[in-house]
Image: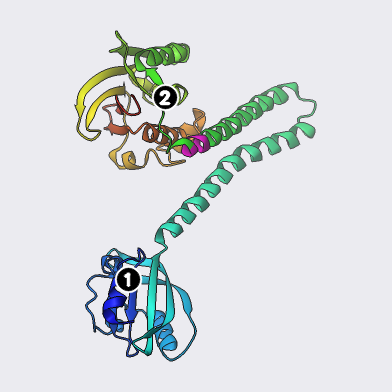
Amino acid sequence: MTPAETADLLATVPVPMLVVDARARVVAGNDAAEALLGPVPPARPFVTVLRHPEVNAALDSVLAGGEKALLNATIKTRQGGVLCAVTVTPLRLDGDRGASLAIEDRSRDEETGQMRRDFVANVSHELRTPLTALMGFIETLRGPARNDPNARDRFLDIMEREAGRMNRLIGDLLSLSRVEQDERRRPGDRVDLAALLSSVVVTLAPSADGAGVRIELLGVEGPALLPGDADQLVQVFHNLIENAVKYGGTGGLVTVTLEHLDHEPVLRGPAWMITVADHGEGIDARHLPRLTERFYRVDSHRSREQGGTGLGLAIVKHIVNRHRGRLRIESERGQGSRFFVILPEGVGMT
């Protein structure tokens, strides 16, 4: 294979790949390799392109007649240190020895694996806490509190609360799984946002009244039609309004506003914007970028006391993504919080 033929072949390969000759000099590299490593001019010594002792040792071994080598290595790239799988394969080049090096970025796989491990650890922690409490109270009721009716009633109340917390967590985990499964499939049913929001507010009115909070609904005088999944959108606005009542209710008022946008720049077309605003204590700016992360809580103790699972806003984010919309959060300490859901008016409509 000539150098020109080698370059033509590499251009068809989507994975970063280099070919070197018997003297360990670069013969050719494809565009993917240059995007990862920077410019790779022909005839350049490979050791100056990729400075990694194990990779260079594997290349030397293959050029000396050894077998194909596969190794994992953290390689210095344009993006910094990146975990890669490097495959060094013997190659005949113009009748002489040579080698190809394929470099696969595995950093995303590692990030995904770490997210999965963190998720399992968080779920285990969230379940272990109420389970430990239940086991402790069961042991107490079988022993010292067996004949104490006051203690028994108090412990049973706590056990019921902890069991309810586990049930909500499992429900949210199942909901998150379903939402993620459907996220790539666009909803096509026609939904009236005005009617949907009115229904959610009516549902939440008794609990808001009990907390001394008034929910004010604006902009729902006429229909607001768009393609969507009604059940999922109910889940979005139920979660946002309920959170506003729970965590921003100290202001005594939660405002839900529906507004039509003739042109939303990011969505590139007409859209409906729903704003859920409270007048409570607000959220420190450092927390805002992480609010939609799974199990992230601004105040863990208060959230658990209020029955929160730490998954609500993650579910909201995935549902909004499925509807090809946007979720924006604004808040300042002492100034309340505003959650904006912007949904395209025309996606999926014929």
Q: Nearer the viewer, residue 72 or 33?
A: 33
Where is residue 347, by image quadrant? Answer: top left
Q: Residue at x 29, y 12 (%)?
A: 218
**Where does residue 3 sit, x and y in percent of width and height?**
28, 81
Q: Is residue 145 left or right of residue 197?
A: right
Q: Nearer the viewer, residue 315 or 159?
A: 315
Q: Which mark is residue 10?
A: 1
Marker disc for residue 233: 2
Magenta stretch, residue numbers: 176-181
Q: Position of residue 217 (x, y in %)?
A: 33, 13
Q: Is residue 24 magenta?
A: no
On residue 39, the disc is: none
Q: Position of residue 191 (x, y in %)?
A: 39, 18
Return the disc, 1 or 2, that comes first in the chain's sequence. 1
Which secondary structure lies at badge 2? Answer: helix
Point out the image quarter for the N terminus.
Answer: bottom left
